[in-house]
Image (cartoon, rainbow, N blue to C red):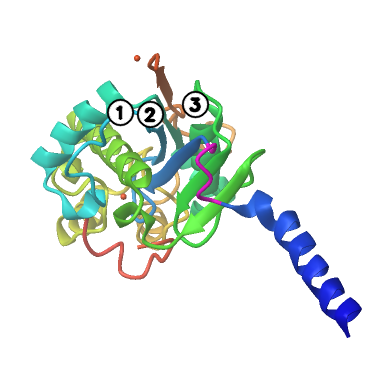
Amino acid sequence: MTDVRFSRKAAAAAAALAQSGLNFDSPDEIVCGVDEAGRGPLAGPVVAAAVIFDPSRPMIRGLDDSKVLSAKKRDELYDKIVDRALAYCVASATVEEIDTLNILHATMLAMKRAVEGLSVAPTLAKIDGNRCPTLSIRSEAIIGGDAKVKSISAASILAKVTRDRMLLQLHQEFPVYGFDAHSGYGTPQHLAALREHGPCAHHRRSFAPVREAHVRFGLRTTASGDALVMPVAPAIVQTVEWTLDDDPFDETGRHAKPF
């Protein structure tokens, strides 16, 4: 009987040792938080950010899910995150990539680009939502992570502010859609503009309201009869490094209102 108990203890110890590599709270981890902005809109890219904080420095106060913060507060925190992060990267997937891959896979691509663009190599990526992109490092999906993990909150703010600024730029080029008011989401104002003016090159043709508008207005074609592919903004990747001294993937209702 003694030998049996010993064997069971030894087996349990071996199993615990084998699982030690799955400790997501190890102090030796270099953790990056990852989040996205812009899965639900009818226009514009999907943007993702990855953030690594220096654990030896005081944490920024007020970090939270970007959706619950005012635009003014997000802008204030954006500057603090950029100033204090050990490393960060903001990346995107284009409208063309969204229409080719679908929005889920384009989001995973943007997240992958953000993590891989970090100037400091993380050992663990904590992802907001219920799934992770394919990465060369370990990753953990955290539902509601943008309100639970500070580095994810920071990533959600960087992604949201960056994307909102991109849509403000689009508004200068295409003022009839009101991108400055809704950031590309399917608000009544935006849907009415689509019905009146049809889609522009930055609308996502794989999304039903845009696809229907294309049908109503007809596809533009070249002289040879081929569909004309209109240019869209390239994917962005922005990184920074400093010396040491924030609804997971559920699109329900997200065409109805902006975050």
Disc nearer the start of the sequence (3/1)? 1
Which residue position holds label 1?
57
Residue 27 lies in the magenta-colored region: yes
According to the picture, the residue beneath numbered tag 2 turns out to be: 54
Residue pointed to by mark 3: 118
What residue is drawn where x is 44% and y is 35%? Answer: 92
Rate crowding at label 2 as few (under 14), some (14 to 19) or many (20 or more) other CA atoms within 10 Å.
some
Percent across and percent down for residue 27 are 50, 40
Q: Amino acid at mark 1?
A: Arg
Q: Secondary structure at mark 3?
A: loop
Q: Is residue 48 magenta?
A: no
Q: Nearer the viewer, mark 2 or mark 3?
A: 2
Q: Of discs 3 and 1, which sits in the foreground?
A: 1
Q: Secondary structure at mark 1?
A: loop
Q: Can see residue 153?
A: yes
Give the residues in magenta. 24-29
